[in-house]
Image (cartoon, rainbow, N blue to C red):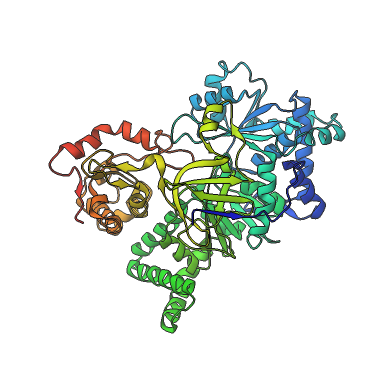
Amino acid sequence: MDHHTVPALVPADPAANATDLLIDRVKATPDAPLFSVPSGDGWSDVSAAEFLRQVMALAKGLVASGIAPGDKIGFMCKTSYEWTLVDFATWFAGAVLVPVYDTSSPSQIHWILSDSGATAMIVETPDHFSRFDEVHSELSDVGPVWQLHLGDLDKLAQSGTEVPDDEIERRRSLAQGADMATLIYTSGSMGTPKGCVLTHSNFVELSRNAAVAMKEVVAPGASTLLFITLAHIFARFIAVLAIHSGVKVGHQPDTSRLLESLGSFKPTFLLAVPRVFEKVYNSAEQKAEAGGKGKIFRTAAATAIEYSKAAEAGSVPFGLKAKFLLFDRLVFAKLRAAMGGNVRYAVSGSAPLGARLGHFYHALGITILEGYGLTETTAPATVNIPSASKIGTVGPPLPGMSVRIAEDCEIQVKGIDVFKEYWKNPEATAESFDDGWFCTGDLGTLDDDGFLTITGRKKEIIVTAGGKNVAPAVLEDPVRSNPIVGQIVVVGDQKPFIAALVTLDPEMLPTWLQNNGEDSTMSVADAARNPAVIAEVQRAIDTANSRVSRAESIRKFEILDTDFTEASGHLTPKLSIKRNVIVKDFAEAIENMYSTPQPTQGLSLS
C-alpha cells in the first residue's frame, strides 16, 4: 500500500477557534475538575469554570497592558498549570503565543523573538530572565516583560479589572479557523529553527477528531500528569485536547520527583517519549539486580513479552498464562503501583519505541499507543488507538488525515493538522510540499491495513563507500535501550564500514557498576575505559548487529567520556540527537576509528 486516508469523524467548522474548546467545555461540565495543582503533599482541583475565570482575568490584564489583536508574545516557562493558563489567556486576548524552550540559550531566545516579531515576553524564573536579559537590548520590538516568579501574572490580572467582558468576547471571536493560533519553532536538529504557523483549525479539528478516535483514553474520569515540556507541540496538543475532552491535568516538570507525583496524582494515562519508558524498565531491572533478583526480573520480562505476543496473535497457551500470572503478582504489580496504579494507556512519540518495550508494557496492562508526527503536523499525524493498534507501528492516520509513501519511501501527509506555512520563509514552505502533500523527510512503509512503520530519516541515511544504504535508527534504537548507554550515533557516510560513537548514562552507570562488582564511584571517563563497561556496550552492539546484514553492522565503536546533552548543544529539547553537530564536534574521534588499524574501544564480533 502506498497511501491511506481516514475520513474525518467530526464535520469541520471553519469559523471555530481554540477558545471555543474551553467555552464548550465549561458549558458541558462547569464544575468538573479540569486541572489539579500541587497543594502540600497532595493536589487541589481547579474546575472548568474557575479556569475560565482565571483565563478571562489574565486576558483582561494583557489587554490593559496594551497587547493588541495579532500581537505575538514570547513565553519561556517550565511545564506547569500557568503554561496553559497563559496559552488560553493569550488566545482570549486575541494574541499569538510564541513558545521558547525553558532550556534555550540567549542566542536561541534572540532568534525566536526577533524572527517572530514578538512585542512582549513572559518568563518564569530568574534564570530565564537572566538569559533573556542578555539579548534584551538587541530586541527593540519587545516591550513589556513579565516574570512569574515576581507574581506578575497576579498583578496583570488585577490591572485588567476595568476591561469589560464584552471586549474579551470580541477579541476571542476575532480569529477564524484559518488564522494563526501559534508560532512554534522547530527544534533545530537539522539546522536553524524554522517558525511553523499552526492555525486555530489545526488545534480545533485535530482535538475534536482525536477525542472521538481515542475516546477510551480521554473518557470521563480520565486524568494525566504532564512532565514533557509544553513548549513542544506534543505536550501542548495533549493539553488542548484535555480541555476539549474534560481530562483532568496535573504537572510535574521535575522528573526526579516523577514517581512521587505519579503515586499521589494516580493518572489514567501518560504522555512520554521512549527514553522515559526505557528508563523505567532499566531502573526496575537494575533495582532487581541490586537485590539479587536480576535473573528473576529478566525471566519475568521475557515472559511478559512472550505473553503479549501470544495475546496479540489471539491465543495464550495455558502454561504461559499461569507463568505470567505468577510474575504479575511478584514483579509487575509493583511496577504498576510505582506508576500510580491507574495507568491504562500511554501515548509515546518523538522517537521509535521498539516492539520489545511495547509488548512488555502491554503485558503489564498498559497499552502504549505509539504515534508519529512533527511540529508541522500539530503533533500526531498517525497514532495507534485502542480499537486499532499494532505494536511496532505508529498506527494508522488520525481521522481527517492522509498518508502516502513516495517512490523514494518518504512519508508524506495532508489533512486537518498540517501547518499553514513556515513563517517568513516561502522558499522553505514551497520545498516542503509536493502537490499539496507535506514532505516529512522521514522514511516508512504502510501495511495493508494502513498502519505506518518508520524506517528512518531521509537526510540521515548513510551510504557507505561500498554503496550500502544504512538507516541509523535500526542500529541505534536497540543499543540505546541498554541501561548504561546514554546515546549512540552511527556514522560511516562514504566510509568503508559503519562505526559508532557511544556515551554512557551517568544516572544508570553507578548502579550498573555496583551490580557488576565494579567501583560505583568511578568517573564516566574512567568507566569509558573499563573492560567490563566496554564488554557490556559490545554486547549491546552485537545484539543490534544481529538484526542487520554484515555490510550494515557496526564494525567499530568508541565510548566517549562525556554525554550528549541539550546543554552541550548535542540534543534538542525533545532529546533528539543533533547528528550534524555531533559529527562535526567529534570529527577527530570519528576519523580515528577509520585511521587506526585496531578499534579505539571495541570491534564488533558479528
Residue 539 can be seen, yes or no: yes
How far from the left and from the top, in percent, is residue 596?
14, 38
Total numbered labels: 0
Residue 36 can be seen, yes or no: no
How far from the left and from the top, in percent, is residue 538?
24, 53
Q: On the rendered structure, is 183 left or right of 564? A: right
How far from the left and from the top, in percent, is residue 473?
37, 49
Q: On the rendered structure, is 320 left or right of 24? A: left
State which quarter of the image contains the C terminus: bottom left
Q: Between residues 313 and 108, which one lies in front from this camera angle?
A: 313
How far from the left and from the top, in percent, is residue 2?
49, 53
Residue at position x 52%, y 65% in the image: 336
Q: Between residues 173 and 297, which one lies in front from this camera angle?
A: 173
Q: Between residues 17 and 411, which one lies in front from this camera angle?
A: 411
* Extreme residue toward the bottom, this view: 318
State whether residue 162 is above or below residue 602: above
Q: On the rendered structure, is 287 left or right of 216? A: left
Residue 122: quadrant of the picture: top right
Q: On the rendered structure, is 194 left or right of 589? A: right
